[in-house]
Image (spheres, grey):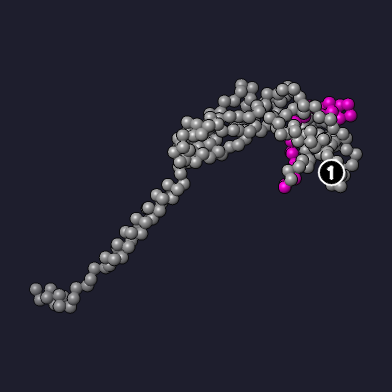
Amino acid sequence: MPDIVLAAEPRAERGSRPAGRLRRAGRVPAVVYGLGNDTVVISVPSRELGHILSGESGANTLIDLKVDGESMLTLARQIQRHPTRCDLVHVDFIRIRRYVAVSAEVPLHLLGEPAGVRDGGLLEQLVFTITVEAMPGNIPVAFELDVSELVIGDQRHASDLALPRDVVSNLDPETVIAHVAAPRVIVEEVEGEVAEGEEGEAAEGAEGGAPEAPSAEAAEGDSGE
């Protein structure tokens, strides 16, 4: 996929008020840093950046920033959004080199309906992103893991993921990615039956009561014998 070119403008003013004016004008305050160079304070078009980040590669899209005639290959990181409107508020761009590996988080999607779910089980996904190291152009768009054959009690681990040869992950191979749990209602019913059984035994014991003490007459008869 070719790099996405995004035109940026230097920011002369900093602070909340100038940043607010930029946002109202349809621009996002941003900074560019990394590779030992000075930090550059810029703004970028909000609509264009939003389209880039909502694309197939998301935040792992290679963005060629154009600032005052200078070209910088970057990745968008530290993406801040408004808590309710989800508008872009601020973005950090990191400079990268095309042939130097970088760290990235890649989304993980589960494929298929597990057989255990059709039997009443519950599919639980425990890992949603995989941190990898790869050349910028080799970062996967997403990982996919087929779970259609899982029955109740089955698991899928990190070792079940098929990583491309040039992509490395430090995730423990034994990490559970997803599993199919037993239906919760069945577990609750079993626990309820056990509790009822224990209560019934206790009630039966209470009805039987303690053995009666012998009467005085019986005691005298015993002593006479």
Determine if residue 174 is in view.
Answer: no
The front one of 30 and 150 is 150
* Residue 181 located left or right of residue 81: left
User: Judging from the image, what secondary structure is the residue with disc 1 in?
Assistant: helix
Q: Quadrant of the C terminus?
A: bottom left
- Residue shown at the point (85%, 36%) measured from the top left: 42
- Residue shown at the point (68%, 30%) measured from the top left: 56
Determine the main secondary structure of the stretch shown in magenta: strand
Q: How far across and how far down the image is residue 55, in percent? A: 71, 31
Q: Quadrant of the N terminus?
A: top right
User: Which residue in the structure is indicated by mark 1?
Assistant: 24
Q: How far across and how far down the image is residue 159, in percent? A: 54, 29
Magenta highlight on residue 4 = no
- Residue shown at the point (29%, 63%) measured from the top left: 205
Decide: is 78 above or below 5.
below
The residue stretch that appears in magenta = 64-84
Q: How far across and how far down the image is residue 109, in percent? A: 59, 33
Q: How far across and how far down the image is residue 188, in percent? A: 44, 50
Where on the picture, by quarter, is residue 5?
top right
Q: Amino acid at mark 1?
A: Arg
- Residue shown at the point (80%, 37%) measured from the top left: 46
- Number of numbered callouts drawn: 1
* Residue 122 located left or right of residue 48: left
